[in-house]
Each structure stands twice: as C-alpha cells, then as structure tokens.
Image: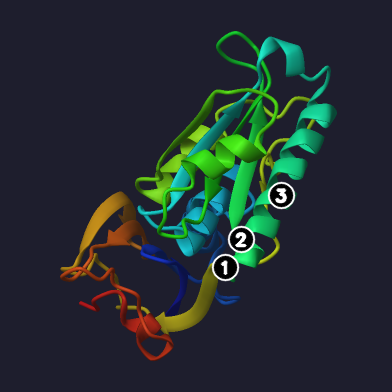
C-alpha cells in the first residue's frame, strides 16, 4: 500500500499534503472514500487559484525588508480607463528599471491595479525588491501622476497576496490571474512522491503552522499542512536542494 505526497516550497513557505491512492482492486466504496480525500488534498494545494499562486510567488521572491508601494493619482492625471492606468504604471516601472540598471541592481516586482473599493479611483499596489537604500524620493520623482506615493516595508510577503487579490475579477473567469509580475521572478518548487502507507507529516520545530486539515477513516488518512519556516539567528531558513525532502518530520 502507498500514498501520494506533494510538497510545494516557496521561500520560507511550505505546503505538504499526504493522501491515499486508490487501487484497481479496491472495491467501489473504498475507491470512493479514497477519491474524496484526494480531492480535498488537490483543492488544498490548488495552484490555479490566483490568490494561492500570488501568495507563493511573493514568498519565493520577496522578504520582509522589501517594499510595498501604493501609487495614486491626483485629479488632473486621473486616467479614463484601467488600460490607461496600466500604461502609466508600466512607464513608471520602465523608468525605475533604467535607474536600477545604472546602479547595477535588478528590479523584481508584482503589481495589481484596483478601482473597486473606497472612492473607486484607479490606483496601483506593488511589491518591489529593495536595494537596501531609501528610494522613496526616487519613486516620487518617477511617478508623475500624483504626489501621494506610499512606501512601506513589505512585512510578511505572502500575506500581501490576500490584500492584492481582494477585488473581484470583473469580466474574468474564476481563478483568472489578477496580478502581473516581472519576468525574472522565481517559481515555487513542487515535489511529488509515492510514499509508504504509514507515512504522515507534521510541522518541524523551526516553523509555525498556518493551516492544517486532517481526515481519517478506515481506508486511509489525508493530511495537509501549510507552515512558515522561522529564521535562525539573523538568517531566514532556506533549505538546500539536498535537504528539501526533509522539511517535514516522519512519524
């Protein structure tokens, strides 16, 4: 007997699920019970959901020291459409990329454009990698469409995904991507394995559990855990490729 195990590693954010495998020789009711648990596991690990994809992408590419930037418009420069607003933002990013290139530094970003809450005015939220220097004055000089440029520490990057996908995708199918990222972003790593039937998982000591789902019946067990690895000293835990399969503790 065996189970399927899937691990997704996105920076310090880790998702693990273990669930039973149906077998051709299983009776119909047994296969149905196992299929129910495997469906729950796939839903928990679903990367098609825009919010989940963004959460993992932010965790892969940004840290608490990076920047959360909000760009707004004054009345004189308020764009007439979302398309015009996105064009304005891309101009800002092109200018910023040129400045970073002069410094020999790269630019990574994720942005969303919103207008469905508050006063309904178009505005932009961005997560941008930090150079380690205060770039607030630079951002304000490059954004020519208003004086209100809010720059603050990113905080926990993956937590920004919830905020940046809060608006409904008007005219888009459920799960459609609501955000845009630079081409140089790293992607989460997925590891799929077949493991013994008695294998389970739990959060390691150097981590905090963010989500946990568990179900057990006479035909098998399903466990899903989402956790964040905590820093050790002044350095965040970053698993080496050699040890990625040992994020969890076997019991």
- Binning the other alpha carbons within 10 Å of mark 3 as few (below 14), some (14 to 19) or many (20 upward) gives some
Dots 1, 2 in contact, CB < 8 A: yes
**Location of residue 165 with respect to 233 vertically, above or below:** above
Specify whether residue 36 is in view.
no
- Which of the image's four quarters has the N terminus? bottom left
**Which residue appears at 48% of the width and 57% of the height?**
41
Q: What whole-number distance in Å separates the C-alpha atoms at marks 3 and 2?
A: 9 Å
Q: Which residue has dot 2 on it? A: 100
- Between the residue at mark 1 and the residue at mark 2, the CA separation in whole angstroms equals 5 Å
Along the viewing direction, whichever of 111 and 201 lies nearer the viewer: 111
Does 193 appear above or below 188? below
Which of the 4 image quadrants contains residue 80? top right
Which residue bears the numbered disc 1? 105
Q: What x and y, as percent, mark residue 196?
A: 37, 83
Q: Residue drawn at (34%, 58%), measured in percent from left and top?
A: 225
Q: Is residue 244 above or below residue 90?
A: below
Q: Is residue 31 visible?
A: yes
Task: Identify the secondary structure beneath mark 1.
Answer: loop
- Residue 33: percent from left, percent from top: 47, 56
- Quarter of image, res 138: top right
Alpha-carbon span between mark 1 and mark 3:
13 Å
Residue 190 vs residue 19: left or right? right
* Secondary structure beneath label 3: helix
Q: Is residue 17 left or right of residue 69?
A: left
Q: Secondary structure at mark 2?
A: helix
């Amino acid at each position: 007997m065996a189970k399927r195990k899937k691990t997704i590693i996105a920076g310090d954010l880790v998702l693990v699920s273990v669930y039973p495998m149906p077998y051709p020789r299983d009776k119909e009711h047994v296969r149905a019970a196992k299929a129910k648990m495997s469906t729950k596991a796939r839903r928990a690990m679903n990367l098609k959901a825009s919010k989940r994809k963004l959460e993992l992408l932010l965790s892969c590419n940004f840290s608490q020291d990076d920047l959360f930037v909000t760009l707004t418009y004054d009345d004189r420069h308020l764009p007439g459409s979302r398309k015009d607003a996105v064009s304005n933002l891309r101009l800002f990013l092109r200018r910023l990329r040129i400045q970073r290139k002069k410094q020999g530094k790269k630019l990574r970003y994720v942005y969303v454009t919103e207008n469905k809450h508050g006063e309904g005015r178009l505005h932009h939220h961005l997560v941008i990698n930090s150079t380690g220097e205060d770039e607030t004055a630079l951002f304000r000089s490059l954004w020519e469409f208003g004086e209100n440029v809010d720059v603050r520490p990113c905080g926990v990057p993956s937590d920004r995904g919830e905020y940046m996908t809060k608006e409904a995708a008007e005219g888009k199918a459920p799960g459609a991507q609501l955000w845009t990222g630079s081409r140089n972003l790293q992607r989460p790593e997925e590891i799929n394995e077949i493991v013994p039937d008695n294998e389970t998982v739990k959060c390691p000591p150097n981590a905090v559990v963010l989500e946990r789902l568990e179900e057990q019946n006479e035909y098998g067990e399903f466990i899903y855990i989402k956790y964040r690895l905590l820093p050790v000293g002044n350095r965040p835990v970053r698993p080496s490729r050699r040890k990625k399969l040992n994020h969890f503790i076997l019991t």
